[in-house]
Amino acid sequence: MILPIYLYGDPIFKKPAQKVKQIDDRFIETLKDMFETMEVADGIGLAATQVGIPYSFAVIDVSVYEEYKDFKRMVIINPEIVYSSGEDVMEEGCLSIPGIRAEIIRPAKVVLRYHDIDFKVNEIECEGLLARVVQHEVDHLYGKFFIDYLSPVRLKALKPKLTKIKRGEIKAHYPVIVPGTKKIVVPEAQSERGALI
């Protein structure tokens, strides 16, 4: 089932997500829905809060990129970044902020600790695009967006577009929820395609 994606400005992003304590059949079904939603929206990462679920987990699939063609889809539950190093600049976009992209500086390498689908604790070292996606999704679970890394001047320049997003006046090819409402919008106009996180 395709889930509507909550837009920037929705109250769900204002507080940190709650820890997942157990995995049941409903949780597994939600993960399937999230992967399907992410694929339809041309995403490569999707946090639970982006689909209105206030719990700490996300799905990731970067296999659309040639260098990651053998990548297996990931479910990261209760993720935390325990180490980071270096610096890297890469353009980011976000399914909750349609139509806005920006170059963002983030650590080049991170070590991620998380529970897997069997609820076992794992630690993996990530670099490149995977490190970028992991950081982006973990940020969502703490109410942070990639635009929060922009300078005040750049952020001010984006304010008119962000205001339109908060009103639901957007172009997207997937269903979205207008912030602060339960109104689902599926605009007919197509957005700029390209993998988003």
Image (cartoon, helix red, strand yellow):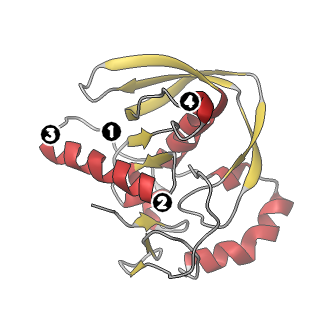
163 to 114, vertically: above or below: below
Residue positioned 46% across, 68% down in the render: 174
Rendered location of residue 159, percent (x, y): 73, 72
Label 2 – label 4 distance at C-alpha: 19 Å
Label 1 – label 2 distance at C-alpha: 26 Å
**Which of pointers 3 and 1 lies earlier in the amino acid sequence?**
1
**Which of pointers 2 and 3 lies earlier in the amino acid sequence?**
3
Rendered location of residue 47, percent (x, y): 44, 48
| Residue type at the position of mark 2 | Ala
Q: Residues within 10 Å of mark 3 (few under 14, many from 20)?
A: few
**Disc 2 versus disc 4: nearer the observer:** 4
Residue 165 appearing in the image: yes
Rendered location of residue 79, percent (x, y): 43, 32
**Disc 4 versus disc 3: nearer the observer:** 4
Q: Residues within 10 Å of mark 1 (few under 14, many from 20)?
A: some
123 to 22, vertically: above or below: above
Label 1: element kind: loop
Label 4 – label 3 distance at C-alpha: 30 Å
Label 3 – label 1 distance at C-alpha: 14 Å
Q: Does 181 sit left or right of 109 as displayed?
A: left
* Residue matched to label 1: 19
| Residue type at the position of mark 4 | Tyr
* Residue matched to label 3: 24
